[in-house]
Amino acid sequence: RQQEKIRNFSIIAHIDHGKSTLADRILEHTGALSDREMQDQFLDSMDLERERGITIKLQSVRLPYKAKDGQDYILNLIDTPGHVDFTYEVSRSLAACEGALLVVDAAQGVEAQTMANVYLALDNDLEILPVINKIDLPSADPERVRQEIEDLIGLDASEAVLASAKSGIGIEEILEQVVTQVPAPAGDSTAPLKAMIYDSLYDAYKGVITYIRVVDGSIKKGQKVRMMATGKEFEVTEVGVFAPRPMAREELAVGEVGFMVASIKNVKDTRVGDTITDANRPAEEPLAGYRRINPMVFCGMYPVDSSDYDDLREALEKLELNDSSLRYEPETSGALGFGFRCGFLGLLHMEIIQERIEREYNIPLITTAPSVVYNVYKTDGEVISIENPTHMPPSQQVEYVEEPYVKASIMVPNDFVGTVMELCQSKRGEYVDMRYLDANRVNIVYQLPLAEIVYDFFDQLKSGTKGYASFDYEMIGYKTSKLVKMDILLNGEPVDALSFIVHHDKAYYRGRLFVEKLKELIPRQMFEVPIQATIGNKVVARETIRAQRKNVLAKCYGGDISRKRKLLEKQKEGKKRMKAVGNVEVPQEAFMAVLQMD
Ligand code: GTP
């Protein structure tokens, strides 16, 4: 049976340990791409798509492989996204596999991110095959790393392949291990269809392309299918595999990995982790593990030039087509005018979207400081979730507030234990555990408020440990905290876009630092500008920006409209992106200043 000849696997690795290089080698070795094709055609077509601004998602590749036992196998290599923001997507990609190669750099050893991905793989009952990569490096110490894999992860690493993806060493051995050690897919070919969605992508011509793993039954062109989480039904117009180019097929059978097209207009109808079943002969239960994912971090996005508002909405609409976890809704700020409140999985996700709007859609943005979602329990019994600090009710109406917490694992060399603990402590961290991984390295576990991580935790960690720390976190839920809203007044006027939520014990300190920072960032104006930080009606800090003595540009603002426009254009181009707040010109950096206050 064909099913017994299928091996579905993925590669897990810490960033830079060589995942992409190894994947390329495996493609080459199996002849999925001839050398020439790889360079001339395949990559060319990717460049073309890149130029058109389409993100390439080569989510799985079907590789024919003749093993040493003389039999022909089908290896499906499934890609996983590479960042903590996308943990859920990673876990669903892994759920589509029976095995995973665990690539560890022979010089660097096991890192926090490696551990996190290994746990995800273990949760999904995968057969994990360790690969020690980069053995060609002079600093490689494969025996130490082998021991580390055994001690830290508890895997038998005695058969770990010693490889160099760069020099092409160990590739065949890896493929043989995949064939002999990764189990063939289980699953019942006669049962009602169950296929898991592990990713999807919007294509302008075909609509949504859904990446699926068939777990039971089979899926064919013309079949009517139902999404079990949403109940929506569609008719399948195409199924196929990536070989590595998309190739239409009559059907995808049990155990196979490939794509489905069904004139679906919106990626939100193809939720990652959802089960596709046959509408006429539905499965009783969906596959386990589906979760609706919610954005964790929110910020306001406003066009610098308010006439860009409609373009910004269009840009967000387009980005949303391909990004089921991006959320946005219109928002009005007294200070910044019309814009959008946008929700993201995490900071990286937020930065990616901001950058795409500015680069691909050419819309200069003012973004407000990111905020997490707080649960506010009001004295009248109402409970509200707030994504924008501005919406925090006055303190006399608030019974208590909860904020999201994460469990963070930080791996560092011995010497930095003190630095890391101090940092975590200063971020309101609660110590959980510390374990020596070997003579030199320590894994430190803390519970931390997500809000503190959103503010430049990672940068501080990196600089405090000379880049040696590796870091990973997962959400653990909400906890009560003593939080207050800090308002900022410029020239006596509250600026809603500068409000932030802060822990009571740090309020004075942060308030003072913040106004000092604003004083630095906001250029002198024609008049004196007082900056005040207030909690409720109480002023906790104050600074004054002195008036400019002489202003050569002042005349421009009077009459000469073309010079004024030129000046504005220059401002738009240059780094000093300004927004008039009342009669004060405030640069973009000021809205982010809250992120750099420790
Ligand atoms: P991300 O794509 O950033 O997640 O990294 P990755 O894990 O995919 O690593 P990638 O394959 O991009 O490799 C990272 C760097 O390590 C590149 O500069 C590679 O050339 C290098 N590299 C990969 N494999 C080897 C190897 O076997 N030996 C040596 N010396 N370098 C390697």
Image (cartoon, grey):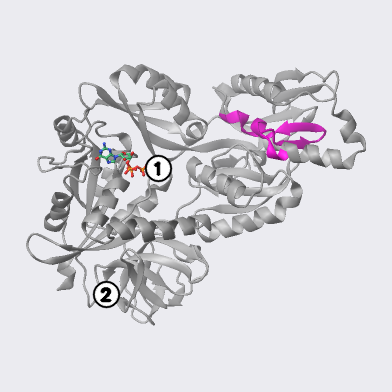
Residue 82: x %, y % from top left: 37, 45
593 falls in the magenta region: yes
Of the numbered discs 2 and 1, the one sitting upstream in the chain is: 1
Q: Is residue 407 above or below residue 313?
A: above
Label pair 2/1, CB-CB below 8 angstroms: no
Disc 1 crowd, CA 10 A, few/some/many (<14, 14-19, 20+): many
**Element at label 1:** helix
Residue 2: x %, y % from top left: 17, 72
Q: What's the CA distance linking mark 2 and mark 1? A: 33 Å
Residue at numbered disc 2: 217
Disc 2 crowd, CA 10 A, few/some/many (<14, 14-19, 20+): many
Residue 400: x %, y % from top left: 56, 35
Residue sitting at x 49%, y 51%: 294
* Nearer to us in this view, 501 or 329: 329
Residue sitting at x 62%, y 37%: 398
Give the magenta part as a residue range. Answer: 572-595
Q: Is mark 2 within 8 Å of ligand 1?
A: no
Residue sitting at x 49%, y 54%: 325
**Element at label 2:** loop
Kindly indicate the quadrant of the structure image that contains residue 179: bottom left
